[in-house]
Image: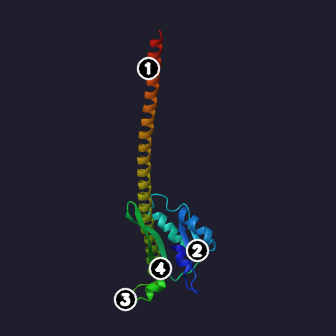
Amino acid sequence: MAKNIIANKPGNVEYKIACIGDKSRTILQRVLANEFLFCGNEIGRAPPSFADATVAANAIFTSGYNFDGGEILYNRFKTVVSYHTKSLPIVTQDSIKSMANFSIYDSVDDDVLKDYVEYSLAQLIYYAMKESSTSEQASRMTAMDGATKNAGEMIDRLTMQFNRTRQAVITRELIEIISGAACV
C-alpha cells in the first residue's frame, strides 16, 4: 500500500516514511531508501506499549521535517486467517486550526494544540501497533496450528511405517525359524 501511494503521488507532494519494525523497513528500503525519515527497529516488539508509540511520535516530531499531513498504514485484524491493510489520517496543528468548528473554542493556545497533536499521533501509532500485533499473532497462531497438524500427520505416517517394518522383521524371523525346523 505504501509503494502504491508513493508511486501514484502528485508531482508537487513529497512523502517521507517512518517505519516501525524490521519487516516494513526491509520491504520498503529496497525501493524507497531515500524516502525514509525514521526507522524504529526496536520499537514495536511484542507486546507494543504506549511508551513505544510515544517514542515513535517523538522521533517524528523531532526529526525536523515539517509535514502538512500523513497517513499511518497498518494491518487491521479481520479474522484468524486474514487481515486488511488500512490507513489512519494524521492531523496537524494547521489542519485543526483551519477546521470550521475550531472557532467555537475561545482559549486554545498553540501549546495546548501542539500537545494535543503529539498525543493524538502517539495514540494513533499505539492503536496501529496493537492492531498489527494482533494480526501478526493470529498469523503465527495459524502457522503453528498448521505445523502442529503436519507434525501429527508425519508422526502417524512414521509410526505406521515403523510398525510395518517391525512386523516384516518378525515375519521373516518366524519364516526362518519354521524353515530351519522343517530342514531338521
The disc placed on residue 17 is none
**Label 3 to label 4, Cα distance in Å?**
18 Å
**Label 1 crowd bin: few (<14), some (14–19), many (20+), radius 10 Å:** few
Residue toward you, 180 or 40: 180
In the displayed structure, 166 sits above or below 119; it is: above
Amino acid type assigned to the residue bearing label 4 in the image: Lys
Amino acid type assigned to the residue bearing label 2 in the image: Ser
Of badges 1 and 3, nearer the viewer stands 1
| Residue under pointer 4 | 114
| Residue under pointer 1 | 174
| Residue under pointer 2 | 63
Q: Position of residue 113 (x, y in %)?
A: 44, 81
Residue 80, by quadrant, is bottom left
Labels 1 and 3: the sequence-earlier one: 3
Of badges 2 and 1, nearer the viewer stands 1
**Label 1 to label 3, Cα distance in Å?**
94 Å
Amino acid type assigned to the residue bearing label 1 in the image: Leu
Of badges 4 and 2, nearer the viewer stands 2
Labels 3 and 4: the sequence-earlier one: 3
Q: Which residue is found at the position 52% from the left and 71% from the top? A: 58
Residue toward you, 153 or 59: 153
Residue 29, by quadrant, is bottom right
Q: Which residue is found at the position 58% from the left and 78% from the top? A: 65
Label 3 sits on a secondary structure element that is helix
| Residue under pointer 3 | 101
**Label 4 crowd bin: few (<14), some (14–19), many (20+), radius 10 Å:** few
Amino acid type assigned to the residue bearing label 3 in the image: Asn
